[in-house]
Image (tube, helix red, strand yellow):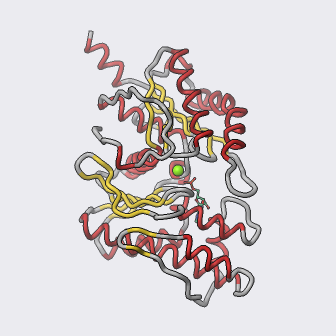
Amino acid sequence: MWKVWLYKVEKMICLGIESTAHTFGVGITDGRKCLANRKLMYRAKGGIHPREAAQYMTDNAHLVLKEAIEEADISMDDIGLFAFAQGPGLGPCLRVGAAIARVLSLRYKKPIVGVNHCIAHVEVGKWDGKLKDPLVVYVSGANTQILGLAKKRYRIYGETLDIGLGNAIDVFAREFGVPMPGGPWLEKTAKKGKRYIELPYTVKGMDLAFSGLLTAAKKLARKKNRYDLCYSFQETLFGMLVEVSERALAHTKKREVLLVGGVAQNKRLNNMFNEMCRFHNAKFFVSKPEYNADNGFMIALTGLKMFKAGVRQKDLHINQKWRTDEVEVIW
Ligand code: AMP
Ligand code: MG
């Protein structure tokens, strides 16, 4: 009997739901391939309004789910496990994904797992780059963390003390009337800058603080040349991040560096990391945009890994402030 069960787990297909912030995503995997990865993104005029984003997800979830099932070319009965992003994230948005996953699990009588969103970013990057034990630099809208696996936990070697790196970029871009996401605009505008303008550079030990830099840059928005200011703002932000990452790499002696999260799309940041990694003889990897941005596939992939390793959770409540280093990595 247990052999039949083991066989079933080995062949299991997992459907994962992402809904931590702006993206409602549904991904499907058998643990080896990405069978489907569909999503819709709530577009905010200013910052994300959590209740509006949650309403958008509630209104559109069924469409994304249907598309994912069609893309994978399977039926709901083929799904053996449901996974959802349990945190960290915005409460109202997390609740939408959690409720849908719970209903599906009850309706199709299949188990359910709650996945840490940050760890899902790490796992999908490792899967995509076939990496073993990277130092992970996770830079998204809300999060900025330098992570590495040690004694069954993703330890945080350095992190932001205030806002996320992407958030700093988006708020700065808004000063120029650019809607979210501001990152691609900053990258393009910064390319035309020539002269470096002195800005606050705040590295505290292994941690980073962006709000002082952001305030100073915003104050200069109408006074300085836009291209020079964008260039200086980007260089300062990334310089701080690379400094702390380099120290973490030297300390951990890891041989691989993985850059994940929305800000990882930035070519200038990639070049800086490439150079730093070359200097330390470490392999540098950044995932494809479809796996790097928030998506359901990373939740499905991580949920399936967890379940196969024996993770069974009693508490499936959402956890808005779930820290990466609270999760025991037994897989
Ligand atoms: P995430 O929270 O992982 O979905 O990432 C979204 C964040 O990535 C937003 O703050 C974007 O502004 C930022 N982002 C996206 N593309 C770029 C880019 N090319 N350069 C810098 N930041 C970017
Ligand atoms: Mg994310």
Q: Quadrant of the C terminus?
A: top left
Q: Is residue 135 above or below residue 100?
A: below
Across the whole image, how many numbered discs are drawn on residues? 0
Location of residue 217 (image quadrant): bottom right
Q: Position of residue 1 (x, y in %)?
A: 27, 9
Q: Position of residue 265 (x, y in %)?
A: 54, 61
Residue 133 vs residue 206, the one in the foreground: 206
Residue 174 vs residue 194, the one in the foreground: 174
Single out the residue that lies furthest toward the bottom: 195
Q: Is residue 47 above or below residue 7?
A: below
Please name the residue shown 42% across and 29% down the image: 315
Residue 133 vs residue 83, the one in the foreground: 83
On the rendering, which quadrant does ligand 1 occupy?
bottom right
Q: Position of residue 285 (x, y in %)?
A: 41, 60
Residue 307 vs residue 267, the one in the foreground: 307
Location of residue 92 (image quadrant): top right
121 on left or right of 262: left
Please name the residue shown 32% across and 72% down the image: 247
Location of residue 259 (image quadrant): bottom left
Please name the residue shown 25% across and 64% down the image: 252
Q: Position of residue 264 (x, y in %)?
A: 51, 61
Q: Is residue 236 above or below residue 304?
A: below
Q: Is residue 76 above or below residue 119?
A: above
